[in-house]
Image (spheres, grey):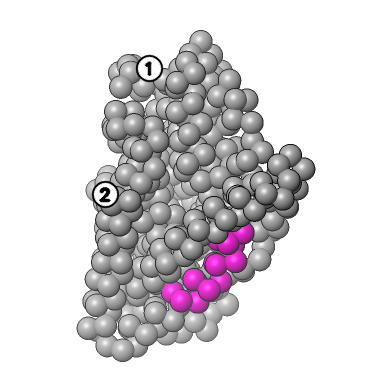
Amino acid sequence: MSAALLIDILLWGSVFGVGLIAFRRGPPVFKAPLREGSMDFINIVPRIALGVIGSGYIAAIIPQQVITGWLGPDSGWLGVATAVVAGAATPGGPVIGFSIGTVALKSGGGVPQVVAYVVAWALFAFQRVILWEIPFMPARFVWFRCAVSVPFPFVAAAIAMVIGKP
Amino acid sequence: MSRSPQLSEPSPNTPAPAEDAESEPRPGRVRKPIGWSTIIIAALVAVSAALVWRRDGTDGVLDILTHDLSLFSGILPRVLAGCLLGAFISEILPHEKVSRSLGPKSGLMGLLIGTAFGAILPGGPFTAYPVASALLAVGADFGATIAMVVSWTLIGYGRAVAWEIPIMGTDFTLWRILISLPLPVLAGALGRFVYVRLYPKRASDEDAA
């Protein structure tokens, strides 16, 4: 809980920091982003509500053992490729993604495969892309960002194979 | 949709008030609250909720709802903070300086700055994407912005501290972050490499700016 509190303090501290800078430059510089940020917030809330409140249902029906079964230590590069697809296809928030990674590790999944899974989840998890990235960023940027990120779970797996286990 | 740097007015230091009048919406603003992506998620949620109801009954549905509602109420203030952070940053960052240090000509240093920025940025997706969008708006190129987003998701401490360490353990998390260290810069470099070949005209415009 203290970690979350620390992050909240940092977050709001940053907001007050940039707000103060804007405030000292005059009321228009302060008021315009305040209004814009609040409008962004109001517009995004329905999506967030749907995504956060709904993700529990999506996660509840995903058979986790199907995903972890794909990540065996003998699966090699095919396993890495499967892990990348599984990472992108994992619904729900970080609890689901990391729990699946943990289950895979504990049930004998290969370390490079699990690394590829976690990295691919971080880069591509479809729910985050759809729910957060596309509403906030230009769509053209999002697709471009996803496309150039494709090699990197494989790179991470390769590094994991070279440097070994944690 | 991004406000391309070369479109900014000759005096990029003063955010032109005319921006609002242009047809293009100001970046960082959420444009359509309900779009196709919302509909896809809504359909997925509806189907999943129906399956949960069939398997676990009304109690199962209500359990998940209660849990997710408390999660939602916890996230809500952070979303507001992220939106405000993005809006203030796009207002106060000097465009000229940003396009020099994060623009298409910023080289490896620009990618490293983007990476460092993504790594230290507090908060979750509710901060990272509004801020990244703000950077794009004030003159960062795709490469530096990709470095920032990838750095936030792979080596940022927010998710690692709040979720990955408690669930996956400190050893795995630190080791995974170590492996990920070079990736944001590589992704940003690949992004730039592809971008100038995919959009040669736009890229040369940016060079001229």
Percent of width and height locating residue A29: 33, 83
Where B113 falls versus A78 (above or below)? Answer: below
Residue at mark 1 to residue at mark 2: CA–CA distance: 26 Å
Percent of width and height locating residue B142: 43, 53
SS majority, magenta: helix
Tell me if residue B171 is in the magenta stretch.
no
Q: Which residue lies at the image location 46% right of the left edge and 25% below the top edge?
A: A114
Where A97 falls versus B30 (above or below)? Answer: above
Locate residue B101: give its quadrant.
bottom left
Q: Badge 2 is on which residue?
A: B116
Where B90 falls versus A88 (above or below)? Answer: below
Residue at the farthest front position: B59
Amino acid type of disc 1?
A: Met
Amino acid type of disc 2?
A: Ala
Q: Badge 1 is on which residue?
A: A161
| Front residue of this view, candidates A66 and B96 | A66
Q: Is residue A112 visible?
A: yes
Image quarter hosting the C terminus of chain B = bottom left
| Front residue of this view, candidates A38 and B114 | A38
Tell me if residue A48 is in the magenta stretch.
yes
Q: Secondary structure at mark 2?
A: helix
Looking at the rendering, the stretch of residues picked out in magenta corresponds to: A37-50
Q: Which residue lies at the image location 60% right of the left edge and 66% below the top edge?
A: A46
Residue at the farthest bottom position: A27
Dot 2 crowding, Cα within 10 Å, few <14, some 14–19, many 20+: some
Q: Chain of mark 1?
A: A
Q: Which residue lies at the image location 31% right of the left edge and 89% below the top edge?
A: A27
